[in-house]
Amino acid sequence: MSSSDAHPSAVGTNTQPGTSTVPSTDAPTQPTSESSTKDSQVPPQRHAGAVGLGPAYKQGAGFGDKLGGLQEEIKGKITRNPELVEHGRERRTGILKKKEQEQQDEEDPFAKPS
């Protein structure tokens, strides 16, 4: 597979031997008009560094929350406590974590205590 078949983002600068007489340390850092038109096809970066770690990282229910919620649901069904069943379901599905996050977002950390 030649570099002409590859996506422009997969081919770096100065990758072909003998195409440049300037050493790589003295090469200009400005992209040429040819490479800028090819780079416009690359989608925007939507992650914060490592792939999989974005703004929505760890917002859902984790494994411990799912097990704890299931335990609360079963305990509520055995004791016939519908509030405990509902709390367990919310914990298991991540709704409880979302409600807690919204409540923390509403609080102003810089407000003076009265």
Image (cartoon, helix red, strand yellow):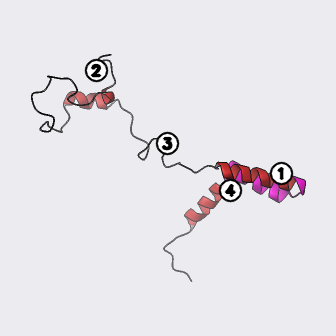
Dots 1 and 2: beta carbons under 8 Å?
no
Instruction: Give me the disc on residue 28.
Output: none
Q: Earlier in the sequence, mark 2 or mark 3?
A: 2
Name the element at disc 2: loop
Give the side of residue 109 with respect to residue 29, left or right.
right
Whole-angstrom CA distance, mark 1 to mark 2, is: 59 Å
Quarter of the image where the N terminus is located: top left
Please tell me in which quadrant of the rendered image residue 107 appears.
bottom right
Please tell me in which quadrant of the rendered image residue 80 appears.
bottom right
Whole-angstrom CA distance, mark 3 to mark 1, is: 33 Å
Amino acid type, residue under disc 4 in the picture? Leu
Mark 2: few, some, or many residues within 10 Å (few <14, many ≥20)?
few
Query: Which residue matches tag 4?
Result: 96
Query: Which residue matches tag 1?
Result: 74
Query: Which residue matches tag 2?
Result: 3
Q: Earlier in the sequence, mark 4 or mark 3?
A: 3
Q: Which residues are magenta?
A: 78-96
Whole-angstrom CA distance, mark 4 to mark 3, is: 23 Å
Foreground: disc 4 or disc 1: 1
Q: Earlier in the sequence, mark 1 or mark 2?
A: 2
* Percent position of residue 86, x then y: 79, 54
* Percent position of residue 76, x then y: 84, 56
Q: Going 56% across and 50% down the picture, which residue do you hit?
A: 58
